[in-house]
Image (cartoon, grey):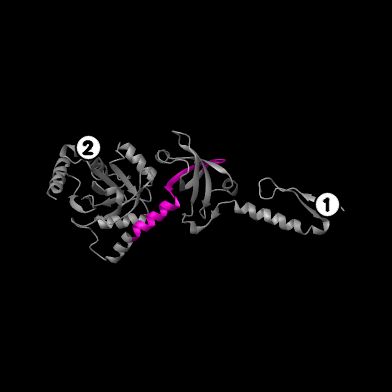
Amino acid sequence: MLSEIIALPARFPLLVKPVIFSRQQSWAIPLIALQFVFLGFAQQPARQSSLHLEPKEVRFRILAMPRDAQTAKAKLLALGSSAKVSVRDSLEVIDLLLPRGDAAYLKAGDVCRAELVALSKGLFQAKRIWPDDPGLQSRLKQTNAALRSEVQAKAKDLALPVGSILPEFAVIDQEGELLDASFFAGKTTLVNFFFTRCSNPAMCQAATQRLKLTLKKAPEFDLPNLQALSLTFDPEHDAPGILKDYANAYRLDGKKFRLGTGPKQVMEDLRQRMGIATRKDPKLVLDHTFRIVVVDDERRIITEILGPAWSVENTLARIRKILTEE
């Protein structure tokens, strides 16, 4: 009796032997072919809104990054509903061109989400990169749940006065790492809001420079454990890589001066608790009031700085006096 032999492709390792059918069993051939189709589709990244991706975003894992380079090899894990990545690309390891700030902190093994722009076959420019490890996202959600409930429960008087305890929260810093309440342990911290696109030199830029100088002079006032945390008003733009570029531009000491970003709702809740008002301004992108709170190692607000024209020396002397009297 004649037989027909169907050789299975090598890329399906579970089926290692040729399958032999008689002519009477030829009805099975279409079923096997259909199985191959399903297996092929199963290898493609899913396009699912339940994966918490914006429509144009993709999720990927970095496989390799050459040292001191702005390129990486990555494997796509999921595609947003309108991500501009073809099916062919989604089945392959792709090459990414990374913004300078992101290349400075990302490493092999990191899971991220971003928008991709095709530059050539298999090469994409990554924009708006966010760390997207499931563990990190879970901790962000859990830690900030109480903050969200606290803000929802208060219809007014959201601004925390001196003497209040700063609520627990979690953000992502300029290194793509989670920053939570443990950051305040054993330290005195100056906390303010800023945004990297601020074009008013008397506001955010001046505050960054003064905070940097405050940390530099702190040992002169016997305040070696002083640190700073600047949170962004503009998380839709200020992704961790943007913050990294900003920190490098101002030569900030990453051990003592951290910048924070995160989900839009989290940053909005923190802004309200900090008592800072904002409004959109076509000339400035965003206009805002000014407040810096000084927080002790128990997250208690011990004093505040109102207005951008503040004295570094007077502020340090006041902090030293308060801490000495406690």
Q: Residues within 10 Å of mark 1 (few under 14, many from 20)?
A: few
What residue lies at 32% left-to-right and 63% top-to-bottom?
149
Q: Secondary structure at mark 1?
A: strand
Looking at the rendering, the stretch of residues picked out in magenta corresponds to 118-145
Q: Which residue is mark 1?
A: 3
Q: Residue furthest right?
A: 1
181 relative position to 46: left or right? left
Q: Amino acid at mark 2?
A: Lys
Residue tagged 2: 216
Q: Is residue 270 found left or right of 97 in the rendered image?
A: left
Q: Earlier in the sequence, mark 1 or mark 2?
A: 1
Is residue 152 covered in magenta? Answer: no
Q: 159 left or right of 142?
A: left
Answer whether residue 283 is visible to the viewer in this image.
no
Q: Answer whether residue 128 is magenta in the image.
A: yes
Q: Position of residue 126 (x, y in %)?
A: 47, 43
Q: Nearer the viewer, residue 168 or 54?
A: 168
**Quick one: SS at disc 2?**
helix
Residue 188 point in image, percent of width and height: 22, 46
Residue occupying the point 79% across, 49% down: 5
The residue positioned 13% from the left and 43% from the top of the image is 317
Q: Position of residue 277 (x, y in %)?
A: 25, 55
Name the residue nearer the viewer: 4 or 198: 4
**Residue shown at 26%/48% (left/top)?**
185
